[in-house]
Image (cartoon, rainbow, N blue to C red):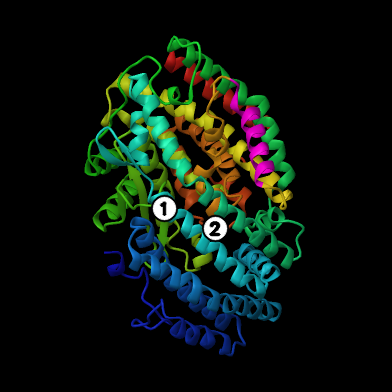
Amino acid sequence: MLKNLYPFAERRFVPKTADLTSKDELVVLYQSLLGREISTVPQLEAWLLDCSELSAAYSQAASIIYIEMTCQTDDPQKARAYQDLIENVEPVLKPFHDAINRKYLTLRERLPLPRERYEVFDRAVRTAVELFVEKNIPLQTDVALLSQEYQAISGAMMVDFEGRERTLPEMAKFLMETDRPLRERAWRATAERRRRDEDRIEGIFEKMMPLRHAMAVNAGFKNFRDYQFKAYLRFDYNPQDCKAYHRTIKECVLPLKREIDLKRRADMSLDILRPWDTAVDPLARPALKPFTTAHELVSGTGQIIQKLDEDLSGFFKDMSSHGLLDLQSRKGKAPGGYQNTLSEARKPFIFMNAVGIDDDVRTLLHESGHAFHAYLSAHDPLDDYRHAPMEFCEVASMSMEFMGNDYLSVFYSKDDANRSVVEFLEGVISVLVWVATIDSFQHWMYENPKHSREERCSFWLKGHDEFGGGVVDWQGLEQERASLWHRQLHIFEVPFYYIEYGIAQLGALQIWRQFRHSPQKAVANYKKALALGGSRPLPELFSAAGIKFDFSKDMIAPLMDDVFKEWKRLSA
């Protein structure tokens, strides 16, 4: 189905019959671009568009291979196709990407392009040239293959429980059951299954660490953290800002999480709150069940989006009609959820593991926000500008979760809708704390690249204590707690891509403020900002949405006050 998508614009450089998974054909195309004579500004801009077309066409071919692999990690043919891409195609193309970048910068010196239009592009190209080191290519390949191995291990995890084999997302449903012994059995069965692969996952990370550190040293950096910050084009904040965020979260958000946990313990009439008590309704009401089938999830979410905005509704219907949604959890499917843009068709694809819980509605709204970003920025002819900085991409997704709260009646009664919002707001507070936990852990690991497994475990447990709030009791579950970070796929696949969730949550909270005052204005600002794609610097993207790029205490404290007041109002 994905292979039958039509290009957004008719190709002008890449042959229609080109096999974009063939390294030989790709090399010919890149050599053609590198050999082209360019002497005028119009010729340079035309050349850039041809480079962009090839980039988008190849990116889409690679995305389809990745999507097919994650949708069925136990299919050997799909696994081999992805491995071939990582081992035999990507390494060949990386030197060509660098050569294209260097050619552009040389041409840019004598051919004046409009400064405002190209300033973000120029900055990114210069950074790519600075970071490119040819001997890093095999290291990057090795890391990518290890990441695939992590995906395969995670996707294969199944639990025999209550008479049948279940996926880990299916097991999470049992943690919402009011039967406490059932919840404990489910939690322990899942933990035991994860522990069977604990050494393999630790081993994967221990292979990744030296590879990443070597890449950083090869590029002239002291550690991988500093290298990755530059690779992520983080021009507007630095590691010290992140550490200030960690401290502010401890001061302003952790006390709220602790108060929520204490209320939960009291509402459940428990002396001790255990890990299997944190997802169930504290008043012993049955778990929220918004839908049974993926079709019902799509239909209900589509109604929410239609109530928000006609344009966004049209985009969602387009995804559904083109088979761009794979939502149901099943054996062999990779964990988690994501949105991937098919760059030549300029259409999004959404992947998730729905099992019929409240969080599935949030996840689809979240990933739909990413998808709307792809649709609204599709007009830009430069492929680079159709991809925004991650800190703003997550504003696009998280804002949809907030704005969708007003229309949950398509799934729920009024009381259940309020209950869903209460759980969501508790999740907002929890995720800000969890982001700080994961981010501080990653800073320490890569600042200390020669640490041992025991030292890593010790630091993780220390951080988990600091950000845990001290209410949930893990006594007797020390080994399970020590390996909690294994579940965070970002650590393995996109290291340091996590602080974005914290920064973006603050942006989404500001859009929520707007939305509560003037829904139409908030949605209009949202769409206007998303339409810019990545064509402007990060603070300007926030400004276009009518919000501030700011994750200081002065911003966090009043936003948390808003969240907590609403939580108390709805949970009274």
The residue that appears at 55% across and 41% down in the rendered structure is: 485
Q: Is disc 1 placed on a helix, strand or loop? A: strand
Q: Nearer the viewer, residue 445 or 553?
A: 445
Q: Which mark is residue 534?
A: 2
Left or right? Give the position of 1 relative to 184. left
Task: Report the magenta stretch's main SS.
Answer: helix
The residue that appears at 48% across and 14% down in the rendered structure is: 265
In this rendering, does residue 572 appear at all?
yes
The residue to which callout 1 is attached is 339
Q: Is disc 2 placed on a helix, strand or loop? A: loop
Left or right? Give the position of 380 relative to 471. left
User: What span is colored magenta in the figure?
Assistant: 453-470
Q: Nearer the viewer, residue 260 or 55?
A: 260
Q: Is residue 369 magenta?
A: no
First in sequence: mark 2 vs mark 1: 1
Mark nearest the camera among 2 and 1 is 1
Left or right? Give the position of 77 relative to 135. left
